[in-house]
Image: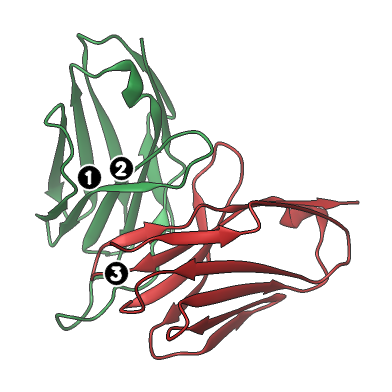
Chain colours: A green, B red
Amino acid sequence: DTEVTQTPKHLVMGMTNKKSLKCEQHMGHRAMYWYKQKAKKPPELMFVYSYEKLSINESVPSRFSPECPNSSLLNLHLHALQPEDSALYLCASSQPPLTSGRSTDTQYFGPGTRLTVL
Amino acid sequence: KQEVTQIPAALSVPEGENLVLNCSFTDSAIYNLQWFRQDPGKGLTSLLLIQSSQREQTSGRLNASLDKSSGRSTLYIAASQPGDSATYLCAVASGTYKYIFGTGTRLKVLA
């Protein structure tokens, strides 16, 4: 099974709402990623978790709060978003390198959550 | 700062043509390079991954090459089909987990 699932598929929220995006994989991958993709633009890395610990935060505003409760699950908590945060949010997973300083293996992406902030 | 550029930005070809998509990156100190396809409004599907020590990878009608010293990778698609229509993205691993995506090539294969 090489599937990464994301829920919900679509989300519309107001600027005062609190919502969460969910990502799940059962490939045994210990690295999980959040990307943001605006229309007709490439994905931009937001966060990386490795072995359930936050490894990378690409200076993302605090209104985005990631969480990795276990090795299969990744959440993105949203609060007080702005209309410019409307985008496709993609989750990905991969196997971390066996030794430090090496690259990861293939990244597998979920279908994304289309977020609209009103 | 790593910058990744893809040329052309868009391409329209008749079915059956062989075609080449280009990816350029500014910093040759990369860990690996991946090619993905993305259908409109969907997630990304991995096509090929080339480690920094490799020169090329093949999968079916796809062949990707990597020339780290010149900062270039090409994706060759043989005998293109309408089902190949999608946006193709290259992504460079400039750190263990840090992937920088290229600007993408929108491909349309006409039946």
Circle 3 Cα neighbour tier, 10 Å, few/some/many (<14 / 14–19 / ≥20): some
User: Disc 1: which chain?
Assistant: A
| Element type where label 1 sits in the image | strand
Q: Which residue is mark 1?
A: A74
The residue where tag 3 is placed is B94
> Which residue appears at 43% of the width and 69% of the height?
B25
Alpha carbons under labels 1 and 2: distance apart: 5 Å
Res. B12 visible in picture: yes
Residue neighbourhood size for the residue with mark 1, other residues' Cα within 10 Å, grouped as few (<14), some (14–19), many (≥20): many
In this view of the protein, which residue sits in the foreground, A43 or A89?
A: A43
Q: Residue A26: give x, y in percent of width and height.
A: 32, 57
In space, the residues marked 3 and 2 are separated at their CA atoms by 25 Å
The residue mark sitting in front, 3 or 1, is 3
Image coordinates of residue A44 in percent, x first then y, are 35, 47
Residue A13 location, quadrant = top left
User: Mark 2 and mark 3 in contact (Cβ < 8 Å)?
Assistant: no
Picture quarter containing residue A84? top left
Q: Which of the 4 image quarters holds residue B13?
A: bottom right
Residue at the left extreme of this rendering: A53
**Which mark is first along the chain, 2 or 1?**
2
Subunit of label 2: A
Q: Residues within 10 Å of mark 2 (few under 14, many from 20)?
A: many
Above or below residue A97? Residue B9 is above
Marks 3/1: CA distance? 23 Å
| Left or right: A37, with A54 as reference point | right
Q: Is residue A1 visible?
A: no
Contact between marks 1 and 2 (CB within 8 A): the answer is yes
Q: Position of residue A1 (x, y in %)?
A: 44, 61
- Of residues A59 and A89, the one drawn nearer to the viewer in this rendering: A59
Q: Secondary structure at mark 3?
A: loop
The disc label shown at residue A60, or none? none
**Dot 3: chain letter:** B
